[in-house]
Amino acid sequence: MSGDSPGLRPRNALSGLGRYTPGKKVPGTVKLSSNENPLGSSPRALEAVQEALVGLSRYPDGSAAALRAALADRFGVALDEVLVGNGSDELMMLAAGAYIEPGCNAVVGAHTFSQYEFVTRVFGGEVRAAEMPDGCFNLETMRQRIDAHTRLLFLCNPNNPTGRYIGERDLVQFLERIPPHVLVVLDEAYAEYAEARDFPRGVELLKRFPNLLVLRTYSKIYGLAGLRVGYGFGAPAVIDALARVKQPFTVGNLAQAGALAALEDDEFIQRSLETNRTGKTELYDALQRLRIEFHPSEANFVCVLLQASAEIAAEVMQRHGITVRTLGSFGLPHALRITVGTAEQNAKVIAGLEALERRTE
Ligand SMILES: Cc1ncc(COP(=O)(O)O)c(C=O)c1O
């Protein structure tokens, strides 16, 4: 290998930008570090992907017309209010590509999904983080961080990694006070799991708030993280701005076919929801019995708050056959995020938590 060329100079915005740290994969352990569906994938999606294999010599439909039409129909929006991307990660990157430039900023929470900061910085924007006491977004502080140069404000509901959520009334009151030059990106990656009665459905707020972009994904409850499909809803002008910075073929034939079929797989979604509901109760019961603090979660993971080092705790869990996510990169060095698994996987988690407690006694 030859050395680096001294003449090459990446953009200034990239200096100091770290690469994404994904949830760890440790061979021989159950991976509960990336909030994937423990039941696997929607069977209907898998069947559709198999059937779509014959069409692989052709480029995909760049407009993902059939999938967008199905999503528009399901969520009660117009076709020009829907965009499909290579995971919702791509849609975040498109939002930054469409709205952020040097001199602009984005407002985020201090303990939330790292991609919001990443995409903003890639386009040379400044990131303004607002504190999140007790793992919750402090909407008033976030609003105060807005200035004339703010272009984006990211909310994650329910929030990764804390699992906390913003209720309907708080969200609406907040949106009413956001100036029109700020696009609020409401990331609902885990919304299908949320069962709180006042959990808001962002898509229903679009008519009132044209400066809202709602993001969803097939990576979580549909069990299709490897297929890479996400979708977004917004006013036609917002969707158009994002579409203009998008490469044409980022959502492949298989991804479009699988996503379309998964949308109809109510049986799998119900089963996933029930598994998550039961599993969360199992974990909550054990955590309470062991007197370990945690945030109540509206998602498919639980954020556990420890006294001791999370790194050591993760090692103990690993010895019990479970890989969990330490949250130092989310600004929470004493916390672990554990994806809710099957009953068998949760039993291993609980055995690991018990071992952890024995160490700290
Ligand atoms: C809050 C949040 N948004 C988006 C994503 C990424 O979704 P996708 O796989 O659709 O890119 C994740 C994945 O972990 C997430 O936690």
Image (cartoon, grey):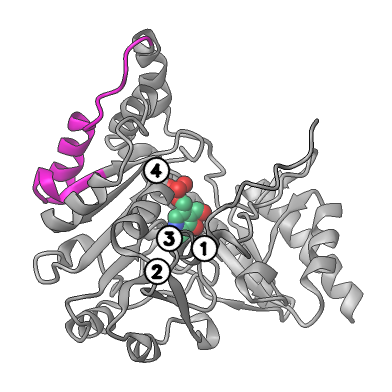
Mark 3 or mark 2: which comes first in sequence? 2
The answer to whether the beta carbon of the residue marked 4 is less than 8 Å from any atom of ligand 1 is yes
- Residue 360 in percent (x, y) is at 88, 79
Name the quarter where the N terminus is drawn.
top right
Q: Quadrant of residue 65?
A: top left
Residue 220 appears in the picture as rendered: no
Rendered position, 218 above or below 282: above
Q: Read off the residue under disc 2.
A: 102
* Residue type marked 4: Tyr
Q: Judge the density around disc 4: few (<14), some (14-19), many (≥20) Cα neighbours within 10 Å.
A: many
* Residue type marked 3: Phe
Query: Which residue is depicted at the point 77% across and 44% down?
Result: 26
* Residue type marked 2: Pro
Q: Which residues are magenta?
A: 57-83
Label for residue 123?
3
Of helix, strand and loop, which one carries label 1?
helix
Of helix, strand and loop, which one carries label 4?
loop
Query: Which residue is depicted at the point 29% across and 57% down?
Result: 98
Name the quarter where the C terminus is drawn.
bottom right
Tag 1–tag 2 contact (CB < 8 Å): yes
Q: Judge the density around disc 3: few (<14), some (14-19), many (≥20) Cα neighbours within 10 Å.
A: many
Measured in 3D between alpha carbons, the distance from the residue under mark 3 to the one under mark 4, in whole angstroms, is 26 Å
Mark 3 or mark 1: which comes first in sequence? 1
Label for residue 13?
1
